[in-house]
Amino acid sequence: MPSKFDPKKHHRRSIRLKRYDYTSAGAYFITIVTYQRECLFGEIADGEMILNDYGRVADEFWRAIPEHFENVELGAFVIMPNHIHGIIVITDVATQCVAPTVTITSPRGPKSRSIGAIVGSFKSAVSYRLNKQFNVTNIWQRNFYEHIICNETERNNIHLYIETNPINWRNDLENPINVKAK
């Protein structure tokens, strides 16, 4: 018999900054990890990421993000065997036209046009395509890591980290050989 929901035990704590508007213009460093760190997207050979069919789907949908979010530009990104690193830049706050007589209630889930909505849309699209085309499920770990990039020096350092990630795969914390059993 499944255990009943216990809010003290099953509470999901947000890792986002409280009171920060994730629709704000700026640059965000994003890391999305596959479920149980499974190497789904390809392999590293001679310091270079070789995408497989799943990896090519992830790459296609990552590159398509600006087509679905008009106020978004992509910075450096890399698809790794079991995770994705990328810089997403929100260029401005997109306008949303609503008739003045309409009452807007806050839906559950991420705010429209926020980093959470962008990443959620990407993860959903990749999951849908991989399931439909290859009958694959359980693609992603819940949630994602984000870091608000504060200045150009930090952005340059993150860009370099992303570009050199395949070369440093052996030491990468997401590499399954470096994850200690719990």
Image (tube, helix red, strand yellow):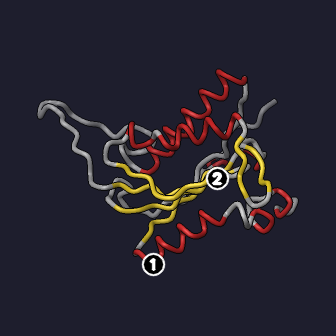
**Tag on residue 8?**
2
Query: Who comes first in sequence, dot 2 or dot 1?
Result: 2
Q: Which corner quadrant of the image does residue 164 belong to? A: bottom right
Asked whether, in this view, residue 154 is left or right of residue 83, the answer is left
Quarter of the N terminus within the rendering: top right
Residue 8 position within the rendered picture, expressed as x and y whole percent measured from the top left? 64, 53
Q: What's the residue at 67%, 22% (across, down)?
A: 133
Q: Name the amino acid type tagged 1.
A: Thr
Residue 83 percent coordinates (x, y): 67, 51
What residue is rendered at 54% in x and 32% in y?
Answer: 125
Q: Position of residue 51 (x, y in %)?
A: 70, 43
Q: Is residue 33 above or below residue 25?
A: above
- Label 2 environment density (alpha carbons within 10 Å; few <14, some 14–19, many ≥20): few
Q: Quadrant of residue 172?
A: bottom right
Helix, strand or loop at label 2? It is: helix
Give 141 or 70, whichever is nearer the viewer: 70
Front label number (2 vs 1): 1
| Local crowd size for mark 1, using a 10 Å CA cut-off: few (<14), some (14–19), many (≥20) | few
Give the label on residue 153, or none: 1
Label ID, residue 98: none
